[in-house]
């Protein structure tokens, strides 16, 4: 077969993919961005046809069932940002972004333990049709219907007095009110509700309380990191390093919240992943009163030693403590979970500790000779690495007085 004939056949195969019936494309939704196992072979053949026709290589990820054009990122970045190394300086993060994740992880799920196409084992469903899908090398829980509500299977009883909930949300246009999170009491009634987007805004309601705040600096479509922080009756809501609701006293007439409902409501089938619910943190009067400070609030991308901007609140606290104690010196120690090879984890933990020290000295004017760094990899676990919650707790940074 001549090269021209091969090219013609490749272009014909590509055109057949592009001319697939519209109902089938609508049913598949984001078919060009994620694939379930049953669709892998057909998608790979289409990629090979495009490769042959255009000369553009298709790069295979470590999961042989997933493909992506060479040069694209493996993980979709938050809206308005790029994946990989962050160019945002800590000083550019608003001081109103004061979210610090809780330290005792009660529930964590990235859906990697669930089979593609199935409903996740650790969740309950009230309405709709949901299944685990894959996009960009990550697992997501996607609403396959136009409207549906799920909830985490949390331990019975009221929530801790201090708690944090965070997750990633992804949606495409149109998205009006595509995401809603509700606090539910023991009788199944709503105590408070957040909705996004209403235009460019996030809306909060609780009884007679109401607020609507504009999300700045990015599109409402794409990926967003959603964070909620509860302190007794007070509640704060954040998205993408912006605080969008700050309610000092949530109406408690309906009783305390015992469960969270997450409603995904759009024909474009929005998704969530990286769900983390934790107790704490309890605000400390003296950050290193015990001589040691352990934090899960310094964030890195998977396998990366680049300190993410979401780490700004904790780094501000550490820098303020060092400024208030000018004679003090600190050691910084990185820790990982046991996913991957031990030697790689050890190296990564050392590089992460060094990166934290570099940010403190370079962006917060802390003298470099006041900081020493080390890494322990996965050798000093503080929780069980066989559970998602334990692994989340083991990924941490520790500061200690010298």
Image (tube, rainbow, N blue to C red):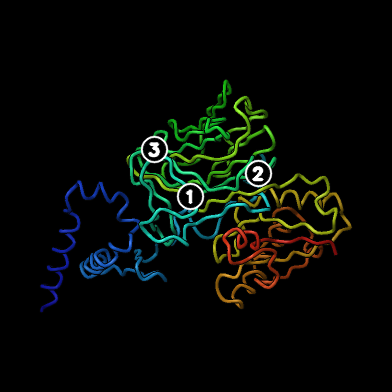
The vertical placement of 165 against 307, above or below, is above
Number of the label disc, if any, that sits on residue 123 = 1
Q: Are marks 2 and 3 in contact (CB under 8 Å)?
A: no
Quadrant where the N terminus lies? bottom left
Q: Residues within 10 Å of mark 2 (few under 14, many from 20)?
A: many
Which of the two discs, 1 and 3, labels the residue nearer the N terminus? 1
**Quadrant position of the C terminus in the picture:** bottom right
Q: Are marks 1 and 3 in contact (CB under 8 Å)?
A: no
Q: Which residue is mark 2?
A: 163
Q: CA distance from mark 2 to mark 1?
A: 19 Å
Which x, y percent locates residue 259? 56, 40
CA separation in Å, label 1 and label 3:
18 Å
Dividing the picture into quarters, in which one does residue 285 lie?
A: top right
Compare residues 39 and 120 and report the one nearer the observer.
120
- What label does residue 53 carry, if any? none
Which residue is at a point 33% across and 59% down the rendered structure image?
35
Residue for badge 3: 265
Residue at 69 percent of width and 38 percent of height: 231
Coordinates of residue 12 in the picture (x, y in percent): 13, 63
| Mark 2, secondary structure of its residue | strand
Per the image, label 1 sits on a secondary structure element best described as: strand
Q: Earlier in the sequence, mark 2 or mark 1?
A: 1
Q: Is residue 321 above or below residue 112?
A: above
Dot 1 alpha-carbon crowd within 10 angstroms: few under 14, some 14 to 19, many 20 or more: few
Q: Pointers 2 and 1 in contact (CB under 8 A)?
A: no
Please indicate whether residue 263 sits to the left or right of residue 396 in the image. left
């Amino acid at each position: 077969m001549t090269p021209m004939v091969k090219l013609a056949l490749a272009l014909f195969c590509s055109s057949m993919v592009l001319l697939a019936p519209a109902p089938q494309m609508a049913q598949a939704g984001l078919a060009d961005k994620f694939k379930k196992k049953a669709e892998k072979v057909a998608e790979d053949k289409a990629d090979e046809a495009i490769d042959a026709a255009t000369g553009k290589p298709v790069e295979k990820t470590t999961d042989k069932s997933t493909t992506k054009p060479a040069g694209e990122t493996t993980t979709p970045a938050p809206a308005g940002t790029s994946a990989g190394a962050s160019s945002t300086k800590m000083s550019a993060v608003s001081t109103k972004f004061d979210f610090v994740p809780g330290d005792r992880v009660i529930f964590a799920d990235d859906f990697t333990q669930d089979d593609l196409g199935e409903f996740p084992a650790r969740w309950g469903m009230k309405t709709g049709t949901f299944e685990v899908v894959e996009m960009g090398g990550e697992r997501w829980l996607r609403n396959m219907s136009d409207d549906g509500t799920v909830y985490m299977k949390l331990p019975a009883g009221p929530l801790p007095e201090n708690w944090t909930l965070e997750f990633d949300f992804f949606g495409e246009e149109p998205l009006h009110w595509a995401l809603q999170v509700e606090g539910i009491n023991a009788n199944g009634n709503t105590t408070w509700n957040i909705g996004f987007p209403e235009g460019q805004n996030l809306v909060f309601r609780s009884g007679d309380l109401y607020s609507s705040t504009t999300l700045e600096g990015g599109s409402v479509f794409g990926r967003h990191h959603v964070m909620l922080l509860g302190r007794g009756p007070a509640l704060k809501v954040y998205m993408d390093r912006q605080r969008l609701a700050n309610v000092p006293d949530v109406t408690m007439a309906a009783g305390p919240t015992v469960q969270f409902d997450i409603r995904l409501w759009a024909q474009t089938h929005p998704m969530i992943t990286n769900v983390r619910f934790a107790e704490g943190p309890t605000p400390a009067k003296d950050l290193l009163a015990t001589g040691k400070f352990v934090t899960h609030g310094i964030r890195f991308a998977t396998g990366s030693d680049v300190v993410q901007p979401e780490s700004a609140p904790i780094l501000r606290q550490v820098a303020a403590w060092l400024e208030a104690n000018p004679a003090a010196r600190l050691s910084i120690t990185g820790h990982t979970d046991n996913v991957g090879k031990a030697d790689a984890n050890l190296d990564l933990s050392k590089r992460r500790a060094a990166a934290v020290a570099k940010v403190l000295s370079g962006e917060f004017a802390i003298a470099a000779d006041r900081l020493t760094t080390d890494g322990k990899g996965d050798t000093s676990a503080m929780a069980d690495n066989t559970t998602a919650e334990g692994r989340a707790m083991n990924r941490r940074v520790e500061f200690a007085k010298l």
